[in-house]
């Protein structure tokens, strides 16, 4: 695994692009983007490896951003481009997992989830969720070379840091197509 030391500070703005299909052309839908924890099981580092405990991670309120509301036909005619702005919270509870990716706590992995909600009777009802393995990330404080244990992951930019993308081939759902992978479409900002 790649060592994290000696990285130059940098900010990346991942910009996944998706196309959506299979909606009722005349119904109204809202598309949301959400960052979800990959696992809700608490882990302990014992004998040089992560071991699952019988405790669950306390889930904070999940952050979602709305990409707007449109009819099904409008969504299906549009390539949907998102800019998920990642930021650090400046809290690491004094814990340093080291500089080896093997030592990063598994439940600190997040993934990007697209949520399709249909407007029914004046309320929104979640009808589908889609996620892609290539949109997982961890965040690393490249100034102090420490893993950041608290991530404010939407809407606001923070101090320079490096997200390390854990890339796998995207698993494309039949009704949601990943057009531009965030790993290949990430843009470096100074």
Image: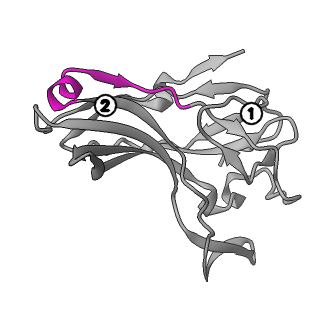
x 24%, y 43%: residue = 119
Seen from this angle, which residue lies furthest front? 122
Say whether disc 2 or disc 1 marks the residue closer to the N-terminus: 2
Q: Look at 10% across and 32% down and name the residue there.
A: 26
Residue, disc 1: 161
Image quadrant in which the C terminus is located: top right
Quarter residue 88 falls in: top right
Q: What percent of the width, then of the height, locates residue 121?
A: 21, 48
Viewer-proximal residue, 47 or 133? 133
Secondary element type, mark 2: strand
- Is residue 75 part of the magenta span, yes or no? yes
Task: Judge whether 137 appears above or below 69 on screen.
Answer: below
Number of marks in the rendered image: 2
Element carrying mark 1: loop
* Region in magenta: 71-84
Percent across and percent down for residue 118 are 24, 44
Q: Is residue 127 magenta?
A: no
Q: Residue furthest top?
A: 190
- Mark 2, residue position: 69
Q: Is residue 94 left or right of residue 26?
A: right
User: Horizontally, is 96 left or right of 84 in the view?
Assistant: right
| Residue plotted at (36% across, 29% down) | 68
Crowdedness of circle 1 by 10 Å Cα count: few (<14), some, many (20+)?
Answer: many
Tell me what residue is drawn at x 59 percent, y 37 percent.
154
Q: CA distance from mark 2 to mark 1?
A: 33 Å
Left or right of residue 97: residue 57:
left
Query: Where does residue 63 sit, x and y in percent of width and height?
Result: 54, 46
């Amino acid at each position: 695994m790649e060592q994290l030391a000696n990285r130059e500070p940098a900010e990346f703005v991942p910009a996944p692009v998706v196309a959506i299909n299979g909606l009722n052309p005349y119904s109204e839908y809202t598309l949301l983007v959400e960052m979800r924890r990959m696992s809700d099981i608490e882990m302990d580092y014992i004998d040089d490896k992560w071991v699952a405990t019988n405790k669950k991670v306390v889930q904070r309120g999940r952050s979602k951003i709305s990409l707007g509301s449109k009819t099904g036909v409008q969504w299906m005619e549009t390539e949907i481009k998102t800019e998920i702005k990642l930021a650090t919270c400046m809290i690491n509870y004094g814990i340093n997992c080291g500089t080896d990716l093997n030592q990063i706590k598994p439940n600190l992995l997040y993934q990007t989830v697209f949520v399709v909600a249909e407007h029914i009777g004046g309320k929104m009802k979640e009808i589908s969720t889609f996620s892609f393995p290539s949109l997982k990330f961890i965040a690393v404080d490249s100034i102090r070379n420490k893993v950041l244990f608290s991530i404010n992951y939407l809407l606001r930019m923070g101090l320079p840091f490096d997200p390390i993308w854990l890339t796998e081939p995207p698993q494309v759902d039949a009704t949601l197509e990943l057009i531009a992978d965030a790993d290949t479409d990430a843009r470096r900002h100074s």
